[in-house]
C-alpha cells in the first residue's frame, strides 16, 4: 500500500498516543499484516480510526459471502405474514471494487435484481461462486460494461486506458452452487471483456457442487480449463459395474491437469448410497479403507483423477469455500497434499456409525 496516502496522527510527546515510539511506516505494516491475518483482525482495525479503517478495508472486503432469502416467503401452513424481504445485500456496493472472492446465493426469482446491481459493482472478482440461474445476470453485466467502455463517449479511455479498467479481467475460478444445464451457459458463450478476450476462455478452475438433477458440465466451453471438481456419486457411479461415469469428453479435454471427485463426509458415513463396498476384487467394511480403495480405483482410470472428502463433517460448502478464499487450503491443494502424503481418508473412523441411515 502507498503509505503516502495515509495520514497517521502521531505525537511522540503525547502520552495518549498508542504507538509513541514506532515510525509511521512500521505501524502501517503491523496493522496491514494483522488485517490480512484474519477477518476478525481486519474488522477490529477498521473500528480504530478513519486512517486505520482505510488500511483494513481491502482485507475486510476481499472475501464476501452474500446469501439471501426469498423475498416473498410465506408460512403456507398457517397463512402467516410474509417475511420481510432480505434480498438486498447489506454491504454497501461502494466497496465492491475491493472484492476478490464473491459467493452470491439468491433464492427466489425476485432476487435476480440483487445480482444485476452487485456484479457491475465488483469489477475485480477473481473467484466467483454463484447459482447457475445467475449466469445470465453475469453476462448482462459484462455486456453492459463492455458496451459503455467502447462507446464514443469513452474513446479517450480506449486510447489510454487507466489501470484496472477491464471489468472482470481477473476472473479465473467459478464455483457453481447448483446444477446447471447447457441453456444456462449460452448467455456467456462469445461474451467478450473490454480487452476483447472471451470471458469463458479465461476460466481455469471450475467446481460444480450439485449434479443430482443434471449431469451437464460446460468443460467443452472452457478451453483454458485446467482444474475441474465434480460431486462423485451425483454422477451415478457404482463400483460393481467397474466403470467410472463422468460427463462425456472430460478425460479428452487437453488442458485439464487435475480432476477432483468430491465426496461429502457426512453422506459417506450416514447414507447407504455412499457406503457401497462392492469394489472389484475387494470388500471392505471400514469407511476409511473403503475410501482409500475408491481413491486407488479412480486413479487407475486416469492419473489426473483425485478423490477428496469435501465438504467435511459439520462444514457446509459455503464455509469451506470462504475458508479457502481467506487463505486456507484450497480443494486443489488438499487433493495434491493427500496424494503426496498418502493421507486419503484421514479422520474417517474404522467403522460406520451404528445409527447411520438405512
Image (spheres, grey):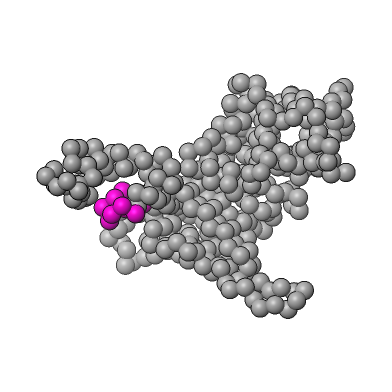
Q: Front-most of 290 and 34?
A: 34
Q: Which SS type dominates the magenta stretch?
A: helix
* Residue 325 appears in the picture as rendered: yes
Q: Residue at x 81, y 33 (%)?
A: 352
Is residue 312 inside the magenta stretch?
no
Instruction: Say left or right for 48 vs 105.
Output: left
Q: Residue at 27%, 60% (x, y): give it.
A: 156
Q: As rendered, which of 305 and 325 lies closer to the eye?
A: 325
Quarter that holds the N terminus: top left
- Where residue 16 appears, x then y in whole percent? 20, 48
Q: Quadrant of residue 263?
A: top right
Q: Looking at the image, which residue sits at the far front?
A: 15
Question: Magenta span covers which residues?
Answer: 47-58
Horizontal side, residue 161 vs residue 80: left or right? left
* Residue at 60 percent of width and 71 percent of height: 71
Residue 50 colored magenta? yes
Image quarter of residue 240: top right
Residue 169 visible in the snapshot: no
x and y percentages locating residue 149 in the rendered image: 37, 61
Number of numbered discs on residues:
0
Q: Relative to the observer, which residue lies in front, 107 or 140?
A: 107
Find residue 65 and report its horizontal and vertical position in percent: 52, 54
Q: Position of residue 183 (x, y in %)?
A: 67, 58
Instruction: Indicate the quadrant containing the C terminus: top left, top right, bottom left or bottom right.
Output: top right
Amino acid at each position: 500500500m502507498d503509505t503516502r496516502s495515509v495520514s497517521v496522527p502521531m505525537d511522540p510527546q503525547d502520552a495518549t498516543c498508542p504507538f509513541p515510539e514506532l515510525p509511521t511506516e512500521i505501524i502501517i505494516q503491523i496493522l496491514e499484516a494483522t488485517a490480512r491475518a484474519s477477518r476478525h483482525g481486519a474488522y477490529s482495525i477498521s473500528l480504530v480510526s478513519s486512517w486505520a479503517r482505510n488500511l483494513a478495508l481491502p482485507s475486510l472486503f476481499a472475501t464476501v459471502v452474500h446469501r439471501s432469502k426469498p423475498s416473498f416467503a410465506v408460512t403456507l401452513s398457517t397463512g402467516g405474514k410474509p417475511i420481510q424481504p432480505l434480498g438486498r445485500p447489506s454491504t454497501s456496493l461502494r466497496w465492491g471494487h475491493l472484492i476478490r472472492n464473491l459467493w452470491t446465493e439468491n433464492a427466489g426469482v425476485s432476487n435476480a435484481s440483487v445480482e444485476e446491481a452487485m456484479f457491475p459493482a465488483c469489477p475485480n472478482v477473481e473467484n466467483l461462486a454463484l447459482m447457475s440461474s445467475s449466469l445470465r445476470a453475469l453476462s448482462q453485466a459484462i455486456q453492459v460494461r463492455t458496451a459503455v467502455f467502447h462507446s464514443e463517449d469513452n474513446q479517450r479511455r480506449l486510447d489510454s486506458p487507466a489501470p484496472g479498467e477491464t471489468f472482470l479481467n481477473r476472473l479465473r475460478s467459478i464455483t457453481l452452487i447448483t446444477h446447471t444445464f447447457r441453456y444456462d451457459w449460452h448467455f456467456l458463450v462469445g461474451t467478450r471483456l473490454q480487452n476483447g478476450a472471451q470471458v469463458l476462455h479465461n476460466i481455469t478452475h471450475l467446481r460444480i457442487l450439485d449434479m443430482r438433477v443434471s449431469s451437464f458440465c460446460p468443460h467443452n466451453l472452457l478451453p483454458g480449463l485446467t482444474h475441474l471438481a465434480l460431486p462423485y456419486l451425483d454422477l451415478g457411479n457404482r463400483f460393481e459395474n467397474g466403470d467410472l461415469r463422468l460427463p462425456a469428453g472430460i478425460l479428452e479435454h487437453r488442458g485439464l491437469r487435475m480432476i477432483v471427485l468430491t465426496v461429502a463426509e457426512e453422506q459417506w458415513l450416514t447414507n447407504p448410497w455412499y457406503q457401497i463396498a462392492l469394489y472389484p476384487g475387494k470388500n471392505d467394511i471400514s469407511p476409511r479403507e473403503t475410501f482409500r480403495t475408491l481413491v486407488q480405483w479412480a486413479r487407475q482410470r486416469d492419473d489426473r483423477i483425485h478423490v477428496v472428502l469435501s465438504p467435511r463433517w459439520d462444514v457446509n460448502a459455503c464455509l469451506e469455500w470462504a475458508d479457502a478464499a481467506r487463505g486456507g487450503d484450497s480443494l486443489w491443494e488438499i487433493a495434491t497434499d493427500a496424494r503426496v502424503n498418502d493421507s486419503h481418508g484421514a479422520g474417517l473412523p474404522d467403522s460406520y456409525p451404528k445409527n447411520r441411515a438405512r
